[in-house]
Image (cartoon, grey):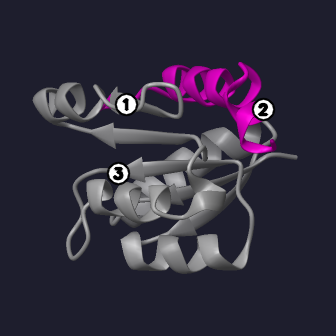
Amino acid sequence: MKTILVVDDYEVVRLYHSMFLSQKGYRCIPACDGKEALAILKQQRVDLVLLDLVMPNMSGQEVIRHIRALPEMVNLPILAITSEAKRAEEAGQSDTRHLRFLLKPVMPDTLVAQVRLMLDGGDSQARSS
C-alpha cells in the first residue's frame, strides 16, 4: 500500500483529500503545516506528498525546498495544490518530473488521477534507485 502525506492547514481539506485517496487504497498521513510535515518525513517513509502551497508559518514552497535539500528525498513525488495559477506556472518550470501542480478547487477524480500518474506512472520508480 502506497503512503501519502497530506499537508494542509485546513483540517476539512486534509480530511476531504484523505477520504478520497483512502477509498482508492492509499494510506494517508495528515499534517497540519510544513513543520509537522517535515517531522513526519524524518520519521517515516512516504511515497508522495500532497502539499498545499499557501500555509501560515511555512509556505509549501519552503517545504519543497527543505525536502529537496535532503538527498534521500530529492526525487520524492510532490503534488502541490494552489489557488494561484501564476504561482503554479512559475514554480512548475523547474522540476516537472517529481513536482506537479493542481489548481483549486480539486475534484476527487482529478486528484486520484494525478496521484496515480505520479505513483504508478513511473515517477516513484526513480526514487528507489
Locate residue 126 relative to residue 59 in the image: left or right: right
**Who comes first in sequence, dot 2 or dot 1?**
1
At 28% across and 54% down in the image, what residue appears? 61
Q: Is disc 1 surrounded by few (<14), some (14 to 19) or many (20+) residues within 10 Å?
A: many
The magenta span reads: 103-129
The percent position of residue 12, horizontal first and vertical second, equals 41, 59
Badge 3: few (under 14), some or many (20 or more) residues near its Cα, within 10 Å?
many
First along the sequence among labels 3 and 2: 3
In three-dimensional space, the C-alpha distance between marks 3 and 2, rounded to whole angstroms, equals: 24 Å
Q: Nearer the viewer, residue 114 or 104?
A: 114
Q: Using the image, determine if residue 102 lies above or below residue 8.
A: above
Q: To which quarter of the image does residue 5 belong?
A: bottom right
Q: Secondary structure at mark 3?
A: strand
Q: Which mark is residue 69?
A: none
The kind of residue tagged 1 is: Phe
Q: Residue type at mark 2? A: Gln
Instruction: Using the rendered view, name the quadrant where residue 55 is placed.
Output: bottom left
In the image, which disc is placed on residue 101? 1
Q: Is residue 10 above or below residue 125?
A: below
Q: Nearer the viewer, mark 2 or mark 1?
A: 2
Give the distance between the C-alpha atoms of the residues marked 1 and 3, in whole angstroms.
Answer: 10 Å
Residue 127 image point, x, y percent: 72, 42
State the quadrant of the C terminus: top right
Task: State the mark number for residue 52.
Answer: 3
**Residue 33 in sight here:** no
* Residue 106 or residue 12, whichever sits in front: 106
- Kindly report which numbered mark, 3 or 2, lies closer to the viewer in this rendering: 2
SS class, disc 2: helix
Placement of 40 over or under 83, stated as above or below: below
**Magenta includes 116?**
yes
- CA separation, marks 2 and 1? 20 Å
